[in-house]
């Protein structure tokens, strides 16, 4: 920096005929603020994209693959039942086993959520993801051999393992890694990659699951086995990924290494602000311990945030998304779409979901979190109500089934605009650092619990209620939209201290929303005040 100032002084003397340096004109030669801001480097982009792609694409692929291969998988279940028990399985028995196959993924997801803290503390983020993706690769190979091994239980076990990995490495570790590697100005954008790669995984599986490709009785095991490709890709690329500066500074105590790594990741020598944030976080860790999920529930000062986390996370799934995605072919069949057109309708819908999510990621930092979340749930509720109407009057006109495609597309876009990318980002922004890991764990468990409930009850609701099966999900979506409007403040660009004050300053008369806690006085010596970064 001294050398740069000396060069500026020499340049000033040359331009002023050797006159002495005038400090008031220094700003004419120093770079603008925009030029001195940390830049998004290729290394940081590559690292985050690989981690997000390999962690989150299997999530979406697991959703779409069972939708695409439902017919051959059910046929395989029936044939194995005949071989084992020498009797023909009823349709209800086949459907029950298929529900076990579908539900094993979110059940594994619930278990995987609890792997994140111990694995990250023991191995770090990069090594943890490597170990987990190795498990996915093994599980994918087993699922690919399920027909040869004549066992549908292998599929259940394999999907359980994949669920563990996607919830831990995908929705757990990779978002934390992304936040620590990219500049804070880009955190909203890269946080949205989680939803994009999940939806892109659904698109890939639906495309490969066409009967003309892999979704047929001869090749469906290959369709299931391909879920291991992202994990294999990560194992190849992991040695080229950037380490986490936070891990170097806080876990390994390597202050110099963390600073040098930040300079490379930001392509700038001015990383003092980020180093100061890490220093504050280290002081907080030394003075206070991380909260557990149980302590989170017992905390009176964080009661509002815990309620908001539970409501938004559960509603993200209980508004019916994965019931629609997993049983999408059946949904279009219920709406009256011709059978030969159904697979292509599913592909078109998931393509719309993927690109809508991609277009939304920049809106997170422009429009804010609250509007996207609120109007996203409202859009889902409206489209579900319209789907109910078209499903009940589908025989009145030949064009009504295709109107259902439009409403289903609106439903998916509404999710891609709000609940999909916003939920986990919102949770990470409304909690202080010491409670954030527990809050993320709570949110992920809630998401996968809602996921499991949806995929288990949806087929039975559909068979007993017909088109009216959409209405309970619509009611949940409307209720969450109202809750967000009344009880959740905007978090864009706010520190935790500002968010905490916003929660307590909202004038709500409803006891179920406001709670019994009093506003917390936050002072400079408070542990929560020490964490001012979001």
Image: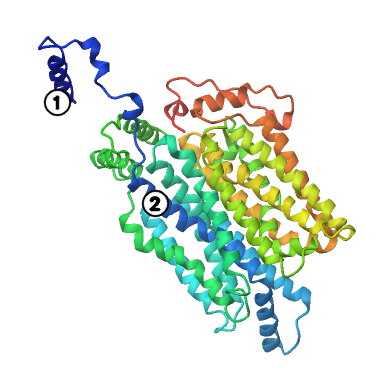
Label 2 CA crowd tier, 10 Å (few <14, some 14–19, many 20+): many
In this figure, which residue is indicated by the disc labeled 1? 3
Query: Is 413 or 130 nearer to us in this picture?
Result: 413
Name the quadrant of the N terminus.
top left
Whether residue 440 is visible here, answered yes or no, is yes
Residue 125's label in the rendered image is 2
The residue drawn where x is 37% and y is 63% is: 235
Q: Above or below — where is 179 with respect to 350?
A: above
Q: Secondary structure at mark 2?
A: helix
Q: Above or below — where is 22 with respect to 471?
A: above
The residue drawn where x is 42% and y is 45% is: 178
Task: Report the side of 461 relative to 364 (left or right).
Answer: right
Q: Secondary structure at mark 1?
A: helix
**Mark toward the start of the polypeptide (2 vs 1):** 1
Label 1 CA crowd tier, 10 Å (few <14, some 14–19, many 20+): few
Q: CA distance from mark 2 to mark 1?
A: 38 Å
Q: Position of residue 135 (x, y in %)?
A: 45, 66
**Which marked residue is nearer to the observer: mark 2 or mark 1?**
1
Query: Is 15 or 181 nearer to us in this picture?
Result: 15
The residue drawn where x is 14% and y is 25% is: 3
Whether residue 115 is visible here, answered yes or no, is no
Task: Report the side of 360 relative to 230 (left or right).
Answer: right
Query: Is 340 or 60 nearer to us in this picture?
Result: 340
Count how many numbered circles sit on residues in the image.
Answer: 2
Q: Position of residue 500 (x, y in %)?
A: 55, 27
Q: Position of residue 81 (x, y in %)?
A: 69, 83
């Amino acid at each position: 920096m001294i050398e740069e100032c000396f060069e500026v002084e020499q340049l000033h003397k040359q331009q002023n005929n050797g006159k002495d340096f005038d400090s008031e004109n220094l700003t004419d030669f120093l770079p603008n603020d925009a030029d001195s801001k940390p830049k998004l480097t290729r290394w940081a982009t590559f690292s985050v994209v690989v981690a997000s792609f390999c962690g989150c694409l299997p999530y979406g692929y697991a959703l779409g693959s069972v939708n695409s291969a439902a017919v051959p998988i059910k046929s395989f279940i029936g044939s194995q039942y005949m071989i084992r028990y020498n009797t023909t399985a009823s349709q209800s028995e086949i459907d029950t086993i298929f529900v076990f196959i579908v539900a094993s993924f979110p059940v594994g997801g619930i278990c995987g959520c609890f792997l994140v803290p111990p694995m990250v503390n023991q191995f770090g983020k990069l090594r943890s993801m490597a170990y987990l993706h190795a498990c996915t690769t093994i599980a994918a190979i087993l699922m690919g051999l399920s027909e040869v091994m004549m066992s549908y239980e292998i599929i259940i076990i394999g999907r359980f393992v994949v669920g563990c990995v996607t919830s831990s490495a995908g929705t757990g570790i990779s978002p934390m890694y992304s936040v620590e590697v990219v500049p804070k100005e880009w955190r909203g954008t890269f946080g949205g990659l989680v939803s994009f790669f999940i939806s892109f995984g659904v698109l890939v599986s639906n495309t490969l699951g066409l009967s003309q490709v892999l979704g047929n009785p001869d090749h469906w095991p290959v369709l299931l086995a391909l879920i291991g490709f992202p994990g294999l890709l990560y194992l190849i690329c992991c040695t080229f990924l950037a380490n986490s500066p936070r891990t170097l500074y806080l876990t390994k105590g390597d202050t110099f290494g963390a600073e040098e790594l930040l300079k490379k990741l930001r392509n700038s020598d001015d990383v003092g602000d980020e180093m100061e944030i890490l220093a504050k976080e280290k002081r907080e860790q030394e003075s206070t311990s991380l909260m557990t999920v149980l302590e989170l529930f017992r905390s009176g000062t964080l009661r509002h945030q815990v309620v908001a986390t539970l409501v938004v996370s559960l509603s993200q799934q209980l508004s019916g998304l994965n019931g629609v995605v997993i049983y999408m072919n059946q949904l279009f069949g219920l709406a009256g779409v011709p059978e030969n057109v159904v697979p292509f309708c599913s592909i078109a819908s998931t393509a719309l979901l993927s690109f809508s999510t991609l277009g939304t990621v920049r809106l997170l930092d422009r429009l804010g979190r609250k509007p996207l979340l609120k109007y996203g749930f409202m859009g889902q509720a409206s489209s579900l109500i319209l789907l109910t109407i078209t499903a009940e009057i589908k025989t009145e006109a030949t064009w009504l089934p295709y109107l259902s495609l439009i409403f289903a597309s609106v439903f998916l876009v509404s999710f891609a605009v709000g609940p999909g990318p916003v939920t986990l980002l919102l949770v990470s922004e409304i909690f202080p650092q010491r409670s954030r890991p527990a809050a993320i764990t709570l949110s992920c468990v809630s998401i996968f619990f809602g996921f499991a409930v949806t995929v288990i009850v949806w087929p039975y609701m559909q068979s007993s209620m017909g088109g009216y099966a959409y209405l309970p999900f619509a009611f949940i979506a409307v209720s969450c939209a109202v809750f967000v409007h009344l009880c959740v403040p905007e978090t864009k660009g706010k520190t935790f201290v500002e968010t905490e004050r916003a929660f307590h300053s909202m004038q709500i008369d409803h006891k179920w929303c406001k709670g019994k806690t009093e506003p917390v006085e936050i002072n400079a010596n408070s542990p929560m005040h020490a964490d001012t970064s979001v």
